[in-house]
């Protein structure tokens, strides 16, 4: 049983009588939504997937928390945006064109999810607040602010006073003059619903709850309020929301005692790193890798596979180094075994979350593309001629789609794959060879004068070069290993390289003989 099925089964066990199983995720569009943010969304997607397979009517809600305040200008946003700190994200102008700041990043994320073939019911919390939908719950929270204060106090370590309680209001107010939340609530009248506030900009004002668009519940009250409003029965949260004194812990009490609803089943999710990368990703700092970035290297099924492999609370890294090639090979092998019926149960359960179509088997090997593109100087026609010898269909959409990703990866990240033939003979290396080893090179030159139907036939000939009557398998393997090392050094100046049969097929025999003579 995969982790998503386990969570789905727990949800059904705890809430067996729901007509609609509402599951939710949420992201604040404070900047580019990165692959760490995506973990929350895709965790809910997989659980929803399993709930549906178990026959449940599922509603998947994704909230954009665009009524949150703008906290800091990310590194990839013009520094002048620091002037907007304190305003709701939905009120900022788009730094890249028309529309709002929040809409730009929201639409980008929605487009990315469309490219992954997954989606949700998209909610803008700015629109929800401004519609007046939450007004009665804002009033309820203000009327019960003393009870809320007491509940939250139980999750704090510092001492709080009666004065703190008297001055506590579970809301923030966006000033009607400057639009920012550098405000302080001075009075709330439960009879008239009037709220008096002052702002650091010097403005003082009075609002009523029916004047929507300027009042927002504080996060720790806002989250459980929305659980109740949307009848959410499952939602994950980051590690920072999962500690004993966290937002989820206090929210579980608030939603029961203030909003008369039981907290949803919860799953904490861990951070995601970039293999070879640096600090933790953050939209507000600009240190991000987005799904758009990943789609330049990996196809959508591989991306979903990464997230399906690990339970949400397990930290893992996304590789952009040479492990990219390994992951492609591993995934291709799993998909092939899946459709052949030979895949082990654990990996079969993981793949069942992704719905990989059988035509995925038509993709060419990523390793061949990444290896030989530089060898043929990125000449696609030469590459197709070469790979066709191994029976690879080089005219399909699958070939070109994976070719683009391989080319981008080699040029951007695959430094070790950016190998080229030596321009001059490696004289210094050649001088250190034994007479027998030089004889191996002479035989190789003879081999290159022949024509071969495919690269496997050439590979077989190469394996036979250093037999010379050797009967012991271990000795022969050592000799072959040494022979291949010599060829790589004479041709590339390296101890290892790509599969030699296909590699030598990619290069003119005259060029090879020139470097080996």
Image (spheres, helix red, strand yellow):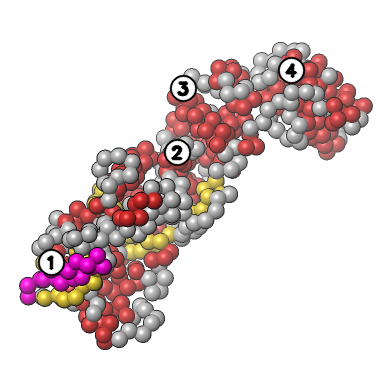
**Helix, strand or loop for disc 1:** strand
In percent of width and height, residue 87 lies at 27, 58
In percent of width and height, residue 180 lies at 25, 61
Observer-side mark, 3 or 2, equals 2
Q: Is residue 342 magenta?
A: no
Q: Is residue 510 left or right of residue 110?
A: right
- Residue at the spot of label 2: 295
Q: Is residue 204 magenta?
A: yes
In percent of width and height, residue 146 lies at 22, 80
Span shown in magenta: 191-207
**Helix, strand or loop for disc 3:** loop
Residue farthest along the bottom direction in this orientation: 162
Q: Are marks 3 and 4 in contact (CB under 8 Å)?
A: no
Whether residue 476 is visible, yes or no, is no
**Helix, strand or loop for disc 4:** helix
| Residue 434 against residue 217 in the figure, above or below | above
Tell me how far mark 1 sits from mark 4, CA to CA. 82 Å
Query: Residue sitting at 75 percent across and 19 percent down?
Result: 512
Mark 3 crowd level (few <14, some 14–19, many ≥20, 10 Å Cα) = few
- Residue at the spot of label 1: 207
Mark 4 crowd level (few <14, some 14–19, many ≥20, 10 Å Cα) = some
- Frontmost residue, 6 versus 95: 95
**Mark 3 or mark 2: whose residue is earlier in sequence:** 2
Tell me how far mark 3 sits from mark 1, CA to CA. 63 Å
Tell me how far mark 3 sits from mark 4, CA to CA. 31 Å
- Residue at the spot of label 3: 396
Query: Residue sitting at 46 percent across and 54 percent down?
Result: 281
**Mark 3 or mark 4: whose residue is earlier in sequence:** 3
- Residue at the spot of label 4: 511
Query: Residue sitting at 15 percent across and 72 percent down?
Result: 196
């Amino acid at each position: 049983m995969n982790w998503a099925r386990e969570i789905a089964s727990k949800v059904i066990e705890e809430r067996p009588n729901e007509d609609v199983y509402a599951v939710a995720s949420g992201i604040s569009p404070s900047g580019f939504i990165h692959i760490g943010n995506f973990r929350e969304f895709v965790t809910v997607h997989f659980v929803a997937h399993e709930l549906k397979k178990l026959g449940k009517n599922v509603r998947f809600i994704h909230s954009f928390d665009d009524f949150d305040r703008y906290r800091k200008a990310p590194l990839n946003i013009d520094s002048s945006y620091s002037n907007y700190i304190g305003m709701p994200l939905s009120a900022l102008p788009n730094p890249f064109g028309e529309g709002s700041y929040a809409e730009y990043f929201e639409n980008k994320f929605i487009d990315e999810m469309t490219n992954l073939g997954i989606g949700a019911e998209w909610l803008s919390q700015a629109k929800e607040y401004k519609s007046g939908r939450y007004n009665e719950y804002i009033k309820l929270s203000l009327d019960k602010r003393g009870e809320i204060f007491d509940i939250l106090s139980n999750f704090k370590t510092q001492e709080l006073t009666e004065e703190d309680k008297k001055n506590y209001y579970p809301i923030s107010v966006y000033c009607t003059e400057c639009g920012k939340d550098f405000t302080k609530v001075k009075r709330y009248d439960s009879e008239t619903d009037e709220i008096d506030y002052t702002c650091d900009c010097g403005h003082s004002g009075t609002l009523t709850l029916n004047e929507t668009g300027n009042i927002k519940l504080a996060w720790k009250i806002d989250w459980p309020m929305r659980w109740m409003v949307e009848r959410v029965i499952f939602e994950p949260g980051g590690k920072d929301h999962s500690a004993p004194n966290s937002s989820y812990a206090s929210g579980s009490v608030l939603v029961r005692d203030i909003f008369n609803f039981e907290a949803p089943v919860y799953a904490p999710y861990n951070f995601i790193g970039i293999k070879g990368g640096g600090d933790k990703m953050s939209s507000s700092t600009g240190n991000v890798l987005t799904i758009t970035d990943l789609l330049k290297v990996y196809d959508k099924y591989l991306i979903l596979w990464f997230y399906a492999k690990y339970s949400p609370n397990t930290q893992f890294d996304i590789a952009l180094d040479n492990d990219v090639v390994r992951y492609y090979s591993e995934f291709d092998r799993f998909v092939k075994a899946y459709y052949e019926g030979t895949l082990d149960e654990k990996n079969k359960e993981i793949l069942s979350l992704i719905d990989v179509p059988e035509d995925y088997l038509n993709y060419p090997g990523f390793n061949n593309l990444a290896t030989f593109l530089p060898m043929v100087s990125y000449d696609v026609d030469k590459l197709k001629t070469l790979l066709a010898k191994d029976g690879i269909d080089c005219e399909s959409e699958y070939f070109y789609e994976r070719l683009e990703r391989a080319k981008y990866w080699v040029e951007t990240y695959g430094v070790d794959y950016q190998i080229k033939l030596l321009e001059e003979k490696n004289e210094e290396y050649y001088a250190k060879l034994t007479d027998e080893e030089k004889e191996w090179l002479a035989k190789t030159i003879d081999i290159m004068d022949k024509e071969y139907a495919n690269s496997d036939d050439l590979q077989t000939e190469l394996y036979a070069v250093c037999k010379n009557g050797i009967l012991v398998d271990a000795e022969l393997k050592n000799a072959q290993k040494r022979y291949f090392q010599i060829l790589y050094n004479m041709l590339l100046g390296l101890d290892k390289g790509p599969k030699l049969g296909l590699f030598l097929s990619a290069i003119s025999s005259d060029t090879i003989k020139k470097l080996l003579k």
